[in-house]
């Protein structure tokens, strides 16, 4: 994501996502939810990441974030 944003000189998105890989890998569960929600918010109806990056880059990331959020919600429900 960061490399693709750099390639098209989308500096706003580079800054937005630059530290995210470390957070997604290292965050505690509570912080991980916040990071995932921040990542998902880049796919809003206005000024959205897919407006500047190709679907082949953004869709797999969005789908992975959606799966992560579902898993975190499942964990909350089951008390895991």
Image: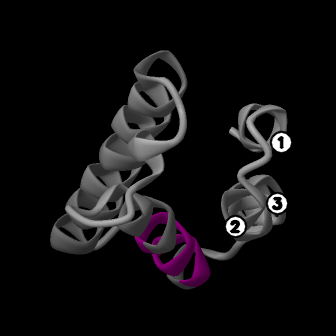
Query: Residue at point 41% right, 44% down?
Result: 51
Spatial distance from mark 3 to mark 1, Cα to Cα?
10 Å
- The color scheme shown is one colour
Mark 1: which secondary structure? helix
**x and y percentages locating residue 64 in the rendered image:** 43, 36
- Ranked by sequence position, the earlier of labels 3 and 2 is 2
Most foreground residue, 13 or 19 = 13
Q: Nearer the viewer, mark 3 or mark 2?
A: 2
The part of the chain drawn in magenta is: 31-37
Look at 49% across and 24% down and name the residue there. 54
Label 3: which secondary element: loop
Whether the residues at callouts 3 and 2 have beta carbons within 8 Å, the answer is no
Tag 2's secondary structure?
Answer: helix
Q: Residues within 10 Å of mark 3 (few under 14, many from 20)?
A: some
Question: Which residue is situated farthest in the front direction here?
Answer: 9
Q: Are marks 3 and 1 in contact (CB under 8 Å)?
A: no
Give the labeled residue for mark 2: 12
Q: Is residue 75 left or right of residue 5?
A: left
Q: Residue at x 33, y 41 (%)?
A: 67
The x and y percentages for residue 80 are: 36, 66
Q: At x 54% / y 24%, what residue is drawn? A: 57
Judged from this view, the residue extending furthest toward the top is 56
Mark 3 or mark 1: whose residue is earlier in sequence: 1
Task: Tell me the quarter of the image containing the N terminus.
Answer: top right
The alpha-carbon separation of the residues under discs 3 and 2 comes to: 10 Å
For disc 3, the marked residue is 18
Instruction: Indicate which disc residue 6 carries.
Output: 1
């Amino acid at each position: 994501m960061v490399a693709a944003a750099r390639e098209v000189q989308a500096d706003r998105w580079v800054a937005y996502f630059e530290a995210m890989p470390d957070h997604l890998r290292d965050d505690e569960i509570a912080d991980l939810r916040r990071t995932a929600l921040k990542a998902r918010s880049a796919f809003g109806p206005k000024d959205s990441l897919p407006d500047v990056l190709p679907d082949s880059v953004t869709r797999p990331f969005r789908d992975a974030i959606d799966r992560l959020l579902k898993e975190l919600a499942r964990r909350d429900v089951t008390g895991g």
